Each structure stands twice: as structure tokens, then as C-alpha cells.
Amino acid sequence: MTIALDRPGAARARSLRAPRPGLAAAAVFLVLALLAALWPALFAGDPLAADPLHVLEAPSGQHWFGTDQLGRDVFARVVHGARHSLSIGVAATLIAVGAGILLGLLAGLSHKIADEALSRSFDALSAFPLVLLALLFIAIAGTGTTSLIVAIGMALVPHFARVVRAQTFVVRRAAYVTHAVAFGAARSRLVVRHVLPNVLGPVPVLAVLGLGEAILLAAGLSFLGMGPQPPSPEWGAMISEGRGYLHVAWWASVLPGAVVTATIVALTVAGRFYQRRFEGRELA
Amino acid sequence: MITAILRRAGAGLLVLWAAATAAYLALLAAPGDTVDAIVGDGADTPGIRAQIIQEWHLDRSAVVQYLDFLLRAAHGDLGRSYLLQRPVSAVIGSQLAPTLKLAVAAAVFGVVLALLFAVTARRLTSTAGLILVSTPPFLIGIILLSIFSFRLGWFPVSGDRGFAALVLPAITLGLPIAGTLAQVLRDGLDRALDEPFAVTARARGLRESGVLIRHALKHALLPAVTMLGWSFGVLIGGTVIVEQVFGRPGLGQVTVQAVNSSDLPVVLAVVILAAAVFVVINTVTDLAYLLIDPRLRRS
């Protein structure tokens, strides 16, 4: 064991075990966020109840995150916003995963020229700024929550398609696929029963990391005014609304923003942890 | 070497052609009538409609329109803005300078900070980097605004007048880049310090800082150069949001306005421009490898 620790790369092996407290914190935060999205009443009251007597009040025991320009409780809005923001992120990620698997399989199974053309465009698109891809879609389809979800999903598709294509490329040459062909399996059966289950390995990890990216992108786009419209408590929209009152009430935009950051950090920590676990199993 | 450069340039042209074609298809796919989009809120008579159809060649076949579009794009003519009724190239040209200034300032700040962090505070880098990368850029901007502009009054709240107005936006845009770049640099340094040549250098009695800067940094730089290509993508996307937060003029403002009013020619021109920048940066990065790593020159 001591010899193993002196090998190059031992530092990496050690760093695999390091961030346990971070992982625990991330897990707790994600569970709380999920609870908030499913059952917001558990944590906070009405996110729309205006109170003109208590406008732009600083955070206190009564209003943990203070109140906004209409006297609404910012904490309650953040809690209720979890449903909007998380469901936008999840829906967009599902679109990206579904379309990514389809396109990745298509590229990995098609002939050389088609594969080359498809995978080159995945490469180019996945290096392109996500915001611009999403904005391009919104410019064509118009603003609104559905359009926002589809735009984010489309922008993330190349990432998933790339990975699935690379996996497909390996799997289609595997011995069990050759055997199935030799036994006369139909092409559709071959793809569904033999190729598909074996290319899906890295997808869940990517989906967790992609969810973080989707939420980040959604917050950015709805900050630009392309998401759910006020008064619905969506995180990006809250930050955007609060920006106008920054000189008197920093909490109305900074605290919702901190929650967005915490969500993405938690998702990244969890995603990277499973990524390492997954890669470790691959090596063994 | 020359064939390598030529091949790169060819691939770059191919990407640009693909981007222009995708842009054209997007124009076709847009819902609603093109004539309606051009008329907008303006006067709408049959005479004006006929004039528009003639001016935009809408009466010809799709193939002719496509070739015409490509030919004009190659000459830098990307059509007219539906909304502003000015040539797109003029709209973009007038807003290019402030955005370019911001992007360059942010890139310089990000690279310098990443180098500083990776070399001096290696233990801290991964946590700090993770938080920086996960923070929405506009949140960094809002926090900086509320502390340094509203509370301390050191920097202007919005606009683009002088150096002071550039500081906060450049920091906002540069921090996420610094976060990622520092992580990559740190990983590279860790790996290089495990190599035999680092042991040899230490055995010769070199101080740890000497090993780090004289020997390991060079090796860590190669993956970091790859990230530089990526970070320009982040810069282009980031300016859209950062310009909005700080109320700066620039391409980002133009883009957001165009998206909100479905002014497709402008949006598409921005996308094509971004693709062009992307191609140039990636070609330069590939050539930079050859400069940094003599091993790559031989093959």
C-alpha cells in the first residue's frame, strides 16, 4: 500500500476520497431542494402575498431572506421558485438526453460519411456558446417557458450525442453484437436489446452534470427576460427583478442567486462523485 | 507544417459554410411570413409588400435565394435588420468595439488570475474554482455592483465611459474563466510534479518554487491552451449577460434586443460572427501547440 501511494497519480487517488463532507452537504441540499419543489408549503408560506407595510426589509428572524419591493417574503419565493426552476432544468435535460441518445445512436450506427458529418457537427456545436444556441432557438420560436425549455434542451443535445456516439462506436464492434448478428437478430432487435442498454452507462452521470448546466442557463436566460414572466417566482426572474433595487436591498437578488449557485455546486459535486465511481468501476 | 495550416484553414471554412447554411435554414424555418416580419409595425400596403418581395428576392426559388445568401455573406453582407431597417453589418460593426474591449480585458484578467492562483494557492484552487464556475455570471456581477458601485461608489453603475466602467464587467466575465483555467493548470502542475524530471530538478537542489515555475508550468500550459479556445466561447456567451447586468452597450445588448423582437437577420449574423471567431481561435490554438511543444512539430 505504501508503494502504491508513492506512484505518480497517487495525489489523484487521494483526492478521490477527500471531499466527503462536501458530498454530504451536497446531498442534504439536493434533498431539501427536491422537497421544496414537490412540497413548498412545508417550508414557507405564500410567495405572492404582498405586504405594503413591510417593503424591502432586510433579512430577519421573521423574513429569513428579507422582503422585496412589494413586501413579498423572498425566502418563500425562493422555495416556491424551486418548482419552476428545477422543472425547467429537468425538462430541458430530459429533452437533451432523449434527443442526444437518438442522434448519438444514429451517428454511431450509420456509415462512415454520415457518421463523420454528424459527429463533426456535434463537436462543433458542443464547443459553441450554449447561450447563443439557446438564444438562436428563442429568436425563431419566440419567448415563453416552453420555448425556453426546448431551447436549453436543444443547446445541450450535442454533449449527450457525442458521448452516446462514442459508446455506440465501441459497442457495435463488441463480440456479443457480432454473435447476435451471426444468430440472425433483426436490426431493430439488435439496436434495442444489445446496443442501447450498453451505451447508456455514462448517461446518468452526464445527465446530473447537464442538469446543473441547464439550471444555470435557464437562470441566465430568464434573467434576460426570456423565461416565466412575473409574478411567478422563478429564480432567474427574481434576480432580474431584484437587480432594480440593488442600491437599497441587495438581498432581493443576491440571496436567490446564492441559492442558484448552491444548487449547481451541489449537482456538480454529486455528479463528479458518481463520475469517479463510474470510471473506477470501468477500470476495475 | 504548411499542409497542417492549410488543412486547418479548410476545416475552418467548412465550419463557416455549415454555420451560414444553418443560419439560412433557420430563416426558412422561422414561423410566420417573412414579409410580415419585415413590415413589422410599419406601414402595410400591397405596394410596400411587393417592393419588399422584390428587394429581398422572395419571389425566386429557395436554391437561388440560398446561393444569393451565401454569396452576399461571403462579401460581408448579412442582410438588413427587420427592426432597425439598417444593414446588419452596420448594426454589428458599430457595437463591436465595446464588446471586444470587454472580452479582451476579461480574458487577460482571467488568465493572470488563474496563473497566480494555480502557482501560489494550489490547495485552494479546486473549491474556489468549483464555486466560481457554478456561480451564474450575472450573480457575480450583481454582487460586485452592490458592493463596489452602490456601497463604496468606486465604479460607475452602468455605461461605458473610460477605464473605471470596464473594471467590474471584466472581473465578472473573467472570474469563471479563471476558475476553470486554474483547475486545469493545477491538475497539470500536479501531474508534472510527479514526473521524473521534477524529481531530478529537486535532486539538483532547485527550490520547490523553481521546479514549479521553470519546469512544471511549461507542461501544465498545454492543456490550458486548449481551455483558452473554450474560454472564448464562454466570453462570447458571457458578454450577452454581463452587458445586460452593467447596462453596457455592445453586441450582447443588440443580440438580446434582436431575440426579443425576433429580428432574425441580426441574431443569425451574431451567430455567424461567433462561429467565425470560434474558427479563428481554434486554428490559432492548434498552431500555438506547435510553438509550445516541439514534440508535436516532428510528426
Image (spheres, grey):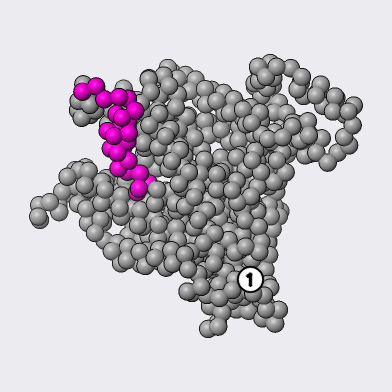
Residue at the spot x=62%, y=62% of the render? A232
Q: Which residue corresponds to mark 1? A: A48
Vertical placement of A41 versus B182: above or below?
below
Q: Nearer the viewer, residue A183 or B145?
A: A183
Name the element at disc 1. loop
Q: Is residue B21 above or below residue B153?
A: above
Q: Quadrant of residue A17?
A: bottom left
Report the residue at 32% width, 25% height from top: A187
**Residue B272's spot in the image, x, y percent?**
61, 32
Pinpoint residue A281: horizontal percent, then vertical percent.
Answer: 21, 47
Q: Nearer the viewer, residue A126 or A215?
A: A215
Residue B167: x percent and y percent? 60, 56
Q: Position of residue B75 (x, y in %)?
A: 68, 22
Q: Main secondary structure of the magenta part?
A: helix
Magenta stretch, residue numbers: A183-206
Residue B31 in the figure: left or right of residue A165: right
